[in-house]
Structures are given as C-alpha cells and as structure tokens.
Image: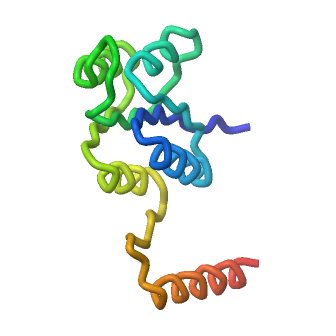
Amino acid sequence: MSVKPVVLLLETEAVARHALAQYLRECGYLVVEATSTDEAIAYFQGGDASVDTALLDVRASGAENVFELARRIRSQYRAEVVLVGAIETAAHKAAELCETGPTLARPYEHSAVLDLIKRLRAERDRSQ
C-alpha cells in the first residue's frame, strides 16, 4: 500500500479551504485543514506530523505569525512551504500539486461550463 502525500492547508476562508481540500483529496493527497497558525502548530505537536507540503494563507492569525510558522515547518519538519495571499493563488498552487488544475473561473461562462462537461465525459468514456 502506497502512502499518500500529506498537505497541510491553512486557509482562513471556510469555503475556499473546503473546496481546495476536496480538490486535493480527489488528486490523491491526504489533507490536514487548519484555520489558524495555532491549529497548524497543534497538528505538528500532536505526534504524527508528517507533512510534505504546507499551503499557508498569509492572512491567518494565531499566537505565531504565518512567516514564523513557515520557517518552523521548513526547518523542523523539512516540508515544502507555499505562502499564498489570495484564494486564486491558493487554487493555482493546489493545481500545481495535481496533474490538472481548476479550469473555470467565476463568473462562469455557460458555454465554457458545457464544453468542460462534454470534454470530461468524453475523456472518461475513452478511459473505460
């Protein structure tokens, strides 16, 4: 059994965090979600703190600022750290971890949504 890579996702906006976490899970990652630097630190102090990549929202609050947390993760846990300042940047960085990234931006163009659905269905049908 292969071990899935672990991503620590520190994102302050719940909707963005859940969407990115779900996307990364679908790409085969184990995702640890945090809303503050305190939650991220608690994960690391909880024992099994294996993290391959940390995506850190620079706006996150907590006893330790995000930049201090980034230094700690890099030095103590030897994980890759990506600092993100906007939801779009976080989505882009998450896409870099997967083979393909989010392909639609809001506001949605109806024809683009339809074209994407058709393309995905065709790809699925070819792979079966």
- Compared with 105, 66 (above or below) is above
**Residue 105 picture quarter:** bottom left
Q: Where, quadrant-wise, is the C terminus in this rendering? A: bottom right
Q: Name the residue located 32 percent from the left edge and 29 percent from the top edge.
A: 60
Q: How is the image coloured?
A: rainbow
Residue 48 placement (x, y as % from top left) = 58, 15
Q: Name the residue located 59 percent from the left edge and 38 percent from the top edge.
A: 30
Q: Name the residue located 74 percent from the left edge and 37 percent from the top edge.
A: 1
- Compared with 102, 19 (above or below) is above
Residue 29 placement (x, y as % from top left) = 57, 43
**Residue 65 picture quarter:** top left
Residue 54 placement (x, y as % from top left) = 40, 33
Total labels drawn: 0
Name the side, left or right, on which 6 lies relative to 75.
right
Nearest the camera: 74 or 55? 55
- Compared with 38, 10 (above or below) is below
Q: Name the residue located 35 percent from the left edge and 50 percent from the top edge.
A: 93
Nearest the camera: 67 or 128? 67
- Compared with 42, 78 (above or below) is below
Name the side, left or right, on which 19 lies relative to 79.
right
Residue 23 placement (x, y as % from top left) = 55, 53
